[in-house]
Image (tube, rainbow, N blue to C red):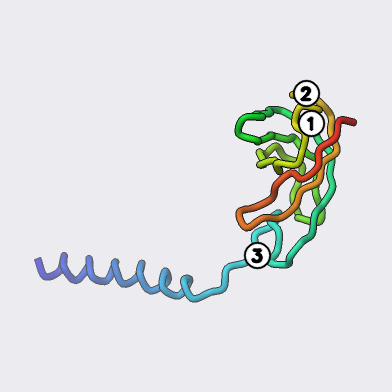
Amino acid sequence: MKLTTLALSMTIGFVTIPALAIADEPMPPMSGMASGQSVDAVDSTGVITAIDPESRKVTLSHEPIPELKWPRMTMGFPVDPGVNMEAVSKGDSVAFTLTPTKSGQKVTRIEKQ
């Protein structure tokens, strides 16, 4: 019984000590994500894959956005109340502007190309 307890204690120590050492290391930067720098409004192009005028949201399959360090991807965005969502529909190729908010980015301009 004492041997089992000793073996278990040593195993826990061997696992815990390296984990605690790793916790003190700084986290490396996440590639593909925007840095802590403030970025003003950015322009891009893409295709509307979904649109919901009632909730004022649009899903865009957009080109890379170097200013935000974003690769080409599909993602949803809230749309500013001043943007006319009736001028565009699902499947349209569009030019748009993203403006930073406290919770991410929002579309502040969208035009059919």
Q: Name the kind of residue labelled 1 in the image.
A: Val
Q: In terms of depth relative to the viewer, which is nearer, 8 or 81? A: 81
Is residue 36 shown left or right of residue 23?
right
User: Which label was assigned to residue 47?
Assistant: 1
Q: Is disc 3 surrounded by few (<14), some (14 to 19) or many (20+) residues within 10 Å?
A: few
In this rendering, the answer to whether 58 lies above or below 26 is above
The residue at the point 78 percent across, 23 percent down is 91
In this rendering, the answer to whether 89 lies above or below 28 is above
User: Which label was assigned to residue 29?
Assistant: 3
Which of marks 3 and 1 precedes in the sequence?
3
- Which dot, 3 or 2, sits closer to the camera? 2
User: Which label was assigned to residue 56?
Assistant: none
Give the number of callouts: 3
User: Which label was assigned to residue 91?
Assistant: 2
Query: Could you tell me if the residues under marks 1 and 2 are in contact, i.e. CB atoms within 8 Å?
Result: yes
The residue at the point 9 percent across, 65 percent down is 1
- Where, by quadrant of the figure, is residue 38 drawn? bottom right
In this rendering, the answer to whether 47 lies above or below 97 is above
- Where, by quadrant of the figure, is residue 62 drawn? top right
- Where, by quadrant of the figure, is residue 16 drawn? bottom left
Using the numbered discs, state the Cα–Cα distance from disc 1 to disc 3 in whole angstroms.
30 Å
Q: Name the kind of residue labelled 3 in the image.
A: Pro
Q: Outermost residue toward the left? A: 1
